[in-house]
Image: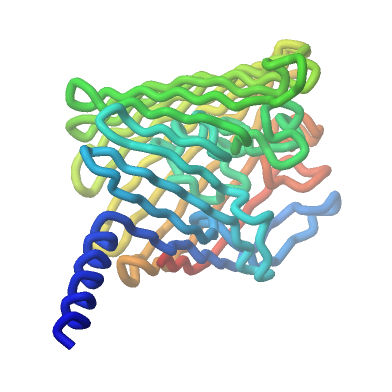
């Protein structure tokens, strides 16, 4: 009996050590809302819908770390999109599937991951990446539009270039009290041509005393290696005080074969009117040049009320105005129906995270 008790005690001790050295977390965001949009048909028809992901992308995932000793850790992240309105999801772990190591040298991850343009803009986006499907910094700045950018990078035929397959991402440790650097490469995996369908990028940032400034550059090749898409993104966030934050961003991408240049200038503020209530106002100027001229503007206001640390009730109003009713302008408006020059959207929703 004594030997059995000793054995159980030893096993229990080992289990405690293992638990302390590694962890796996199940997490997610569930965001559902009702929306009303005007001018969704050529005759000005309205649209009523129940949507997912208007304040934040609905998703679920698994992430974990293991302490390997001497400051070295192994980590993984598997994340899948979730359509709350229908109960469906994308392909398994379509948002992220990566494994890597971290330590004094920085963080090193391999797999399917977001590109550096997205990593840059989410830190300073005026809307905090709300309305992700029609947010110009995501759709245009971070390349989340398959129709415009889907022929370049490692994810051709699978998804938009916002997420790159077959990628290696490295984040250098912060130096000099707040300066950081990053680099990423995505393998095109084409036999005989290592550059075709590839992605390559670098980023830099600074964060200290309430100021955050970030910048990134990336280039994506098409499958024949005859076309290059270059992406420039940057922005800054300044926390004026605990209640007021100002954000400014600029993103631009250039397609060398046609000369097409798409750009987004964004600006916005967050204002905490009460401990539980935050108001956000944002403006985006979306422009096209080089091949044809096009323009559209978006104005968005969001109000959030925190019911708890994990649950938020919210409402928003958006107004988009294109330069003309032509497709080159409408696609920059992002939620304007064909044949219209303007559109509005009113949304009320609930978000819960776990």
Name the image quarter holding the N terminus. Answer: bottom left
Q: Is residue 226 above or below residue 158?
A: above
- Give residue 147's position: percent from left, percent from top: 76, 35
Query: Outermost residue, bottom direction?
Result: 1
Eyeballing the image, is 41 above or below 12? above
Question: Which residue is drawn at the image coordinates 65% and 22% (left, top)?
Answer: 198
Residue 104, placed above or below residue 223 = below
Q: Quadrant of the C terminus?
A: bottom left
Residue drawn at (45%, 23%), measured in percent from left and top?
183
**Residue 130 vs residue 34: left or right?**
left
- Colour scheme: rainbow
Against 335, is 216 above or below?
above
Relative depth, front residue between 317 and 288: 288
The number of numbered discs placed on residues in the rendered structure image is 0
Q: Nearer the viewer, residue 157 or 210?
A: 157
Give coordinates of residue 322: x percent, y percent: 69, 35
Q: Nearer the viewer, residue 267 or 150?
A: 150
- Residue at the far left in the pictured view: 2
Is 119 situated left or right of 239 in this image? right
Q: Position of residue 30 (x, y in %)?
A: 51, 66
Snapshot quadrant of residue 172: top left
Pinpoint residue 275: horizontal percent, then vertical percent.
Answer: 23, 61
Residue appearing at x 51%, y 30% in the figure? 168
At 81% from the left edge and 44% from the top edge, which residue is drawn?
Answer: 338
């Amino acid at each position: 009996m004594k030997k059995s008790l000793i054995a159980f005690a030893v096993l229990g001790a080992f289990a405690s050590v293992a638990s302390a050295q590694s962890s796996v977390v199940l997490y997610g965001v569930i965001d559902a809302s009702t929306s009303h949009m005007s001018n969704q048909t050529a005759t000005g028809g309205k649209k009523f819908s129940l949507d997912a992901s208007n304040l934040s992308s609905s998703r679920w995932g698994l992430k974990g770390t293991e302490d390997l000793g001497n400051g070295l850790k192994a980590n993984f992240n598997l994340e899948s999109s979730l359509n709350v309105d229908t109960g469906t999801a994308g392909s398994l772990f379509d948002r992220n599937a990566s494994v890597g190591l971290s330590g004094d040298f920085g963080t090193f991850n391999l797999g399917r991951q977001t590109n550096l343009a997205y990593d840059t803009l989410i830190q300073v986006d005026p809307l905090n990446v709300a309305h992700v499907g029609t947010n110009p910094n995501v759709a245009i700045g971070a390349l989340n539009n398959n129709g415009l950018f889907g022929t370049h990078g490692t994810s051709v035929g699978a998804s938009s270039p916002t997420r790159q397959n077959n990628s290696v991402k490295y984040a250098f440790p912060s130096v000099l009290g707040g300066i950081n650097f990053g680099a990423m490469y995505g393998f095109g995996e084409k036999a005989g041509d290592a550059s075709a369908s590839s992605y390559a990028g670098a980023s830099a940032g600074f964060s200290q005393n309430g100021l955050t400034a970030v910048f990134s550059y990336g280039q994506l090749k098409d499958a024949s290696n005859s076309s290059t898409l270059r992406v420039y993104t940057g922005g800054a966030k300044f926390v004026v005080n605990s209640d007021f934050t100002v954000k400014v961003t600029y993103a631009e991408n250039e397609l060398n074969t046609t000369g097409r240049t798409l750009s987004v200038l964004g600006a916005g503020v967050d204002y905490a009117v009460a401990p539980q209530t935050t108001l956000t106002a944002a403006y985006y100027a979306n422009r096209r040049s080089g091949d044809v001229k096009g323009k559209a503007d978006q104005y968005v206001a969001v109000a959030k009320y925190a019911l708890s640390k994990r649950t938020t009730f919210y409402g928003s109003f958006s107004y988009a105005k294109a330069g003309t009713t032509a497709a080159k302008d409408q696609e920059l408006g992002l939620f304007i129906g064909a044949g219209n020059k303007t559109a509005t959207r009113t949304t009320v929703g609930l978000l819960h995270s776990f």
